[in-house]
Image (cartoon, rainbow, N blue to C red):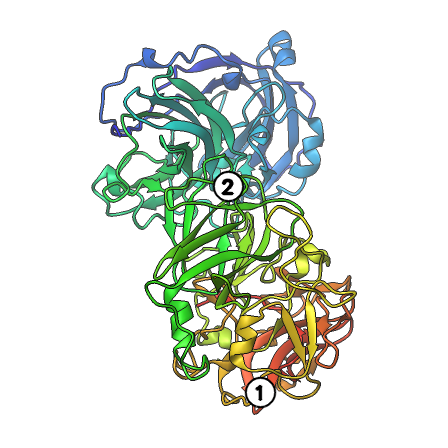
Amino acid sequence: MNTLRNCFLALAALMVTACADESFDRTSSADEGKEALVSLSLRAAPESYGTSTRAITEGDVNEGTATDYKVTDFWLLEYNENGVMIGSPRYFLMEEFEEAGSSLPIILPTDESTEYQCVLLANTHAQGFSTTLSTATTLSALKAVCQDVSSFADLYTGENDLLMNGIVKITSTTESLSCLLYRNVAKLTLQLTNQASSGIKITSVQVRSVPDCLFNADLLYKNIADDGSATSKSYPSPSISETGFIDFVAEDCEINAGDETKELMYYLPRNCRGVTDATLESQKNVDVPDYATYVEIMAEDENALPLRYRFYLGMNMTNDFNVESNYHYILPISFADKGDAELDNRVEDLGHVTLEEANSYLINPMSTEAQAVYAVPIFDRINSFWSSTDGLGSNAIGSSTEWVAEVIWQDQAERIFNFCSSEGAVTEGNTQYASKGNDFFYFKPIAGKTGNVLIGVRRSGESTYLWSWHLWITDYNPSYTSAWQEGIYSYSVDGGHVYRYAGNTTGTNAWDTEYVNKYIMDRNLGALSGENVSNTNTRGFHYQFGRKDPFPNTTLYGIDGEPQTTFTATSGDCIRRVSGSTYFYVSIQYPYIFYHPGSTDWLSSNSYTSNRWNNPSWNTSDTGKSFFDPCPPGWKIPYTSSYNFFSTTGEDGTTGVPNAISTFSQGWNFYMSAVGSGETTWFPTTGMRSNSSGQISETTSRGAYWMTTLNNTVAISFEFTSSNVYSSYGHSRSYGCSIRCIQE
């Protein structure tokens, strides 16, 4: 792939003369200064450009006199030497100024040594903006005034006009004002060339990690020289306490090899994240600063397997991650081939993904028909268990053992994935994957489809399973790895958020010890939504303590969306319920059976009474992730004290008033950072599967979430009702409760 270059283009200044209504909104007091009429000259500041690796002339991009450089209206605000507003904000229409003359009423200081600051906010297009400016009584308050950004369209005002702002100093002798207006946004021109030799097809383009607010007085974040020119201050800016971050909607952009170059244009809020020590363009994506803005390009190779390219914006393409307002970034990207993912970290070959050993996998489908081929390892998982004492030491598979992978159940009435070959080929109408020995089974998700699937592997010709795996197919991707930010408890990720909790001052809470710089998901294991509601999409699944397989509470289907026929469900339920306890190996063979012996353990002859999540000592230590933990790779079930902060009494007792927003609605919005205030996280009511009948109850009135710790033979859960929180509640291990995974 050809070298990516980043260029900037200067823009000629635009002169606009304006006249103002001579009346003031209110009479100034004597200590504010003296009234005067001065002439005003406005001009757009030239767009800045930076060092380039190739020559660029002003004619490379035709700027013309487009509407994004037109001033149609502005607000005038004045502040004294202490940064306090004097007079009132005033609104002017450029058209009226041009008709009325060039005089502008302002307040001048009376002291020759005093300087006032005049701030102009252009293109707000609304006199009603005065309500917003009524709070801007100081420069500090004005600095926080911003427009919400939820999509690309929010960066325009009116008919494609851009917000601008300027600052000019006023003295006692000022007779005229000449003000530079700076655009509050950066401009990005993306030029995509897909050469005939590339062998790829570009399918979509998306600008990601964009600040979700646009500051009206953006210059207050910069240093302003006497001539009105602006330079950046410190990084990162804006801080994560000032803004959140969003992704623009992915834009379909099909460019086949050999097609003409396509040019795309975007506007972006300021997002200066600093610099790194990188020296090569191919290594810019190493140790990227948090929240840096980037362009993501999706493509597919000649075998219709997905490719992803990520290009971070900045003053250069090696180590700078600063998107400055009033800059024009020109990115010409040319693909000569698909690139080498091993040598260039801007390239990701997503065609083949070999999954690590686990009991469940969180799978994110691509937005296009090109999908990754996932390889699930089965040999070690099966043989580790069946070679052990618990597996009777006699059911391991050998190099010639023939086996079949198939869908035990799925929760969607349509096909949401396909078994496929290792190369990605899908056989029409396939419902199984057959192989032998130390092999993988392979599958591909389907674009736009989400849901949950339980896949089992059995010996050919036999009906009992050797192992089973849960596929959680969703748009949620909680893989956030950066360190905690001071005062921030919610972090945006693809499809939702991850959270961290404040812990307590004693240092005994899990969040103060083992879980420092770890995050917890915003939804339950298996949930298809993290929204503030309680229903089958947000509750996820129930799990018996120590078992790896989920138990749903919804209609179940086969791979094509037909009613499932793998097993016979108990009447009135979607799974099979069996009275009494069982052995470890039987629970593996029948992952769809919920055993309910009453007050005793579901597990017969349990020798792991002191282990977390029934963790066999032959696999890993008591403090590690259990061999039977149902969370995806990199995640695990939390342990006792993880939820103490959700009770107003914390660790002083197991029962307390919920530390949550006061309205209970089949769940609580629990506070994460302080008692009774700050950011919140949603926990829906999930109900429980009974230890005496296996039936589900209390789905609208109780939340019940397993933790891994045992108190003798009693398993510990986090539970809540409409009036109480139980941060450490003891249960028989035969109950079925929900799970929320935390980072390992």
> How far from the left and from the top, in percent, is residue 61?
37, 14
Q: Earlier in the sequence, mark 2 or mark 1?
A: 2
Give the answer, above or below, for where 263 lies relative to 129: above
Q: Position of residue 42 (x, y in %)?
A: 50, 18
SS category of the residue bearing label 1: loop
Left or right: 8, with 644 as reference point: left
Q: Quadrant of residue 582?
A: bottom right
In the picture as drawn, the residue positioned furthest to the front comes out as 461
Q: Which residue in the protein does label 2 denote?
A: 211
Percent x, y for residue 405?
Answer: 49, 57
Asked whether the viewer can see residue 80, the reply is yes
Q: Name the residue under label 1.
A: 604
Residue 646 visible within the image = no
Farthest left residue in view: 279
- Mark 2 or 1: in front is 1
Give the Cα distance between marks 2 and 1. 55 Å
Give the amino acid type for the residue marked by disc 1 in the picture.
Ser
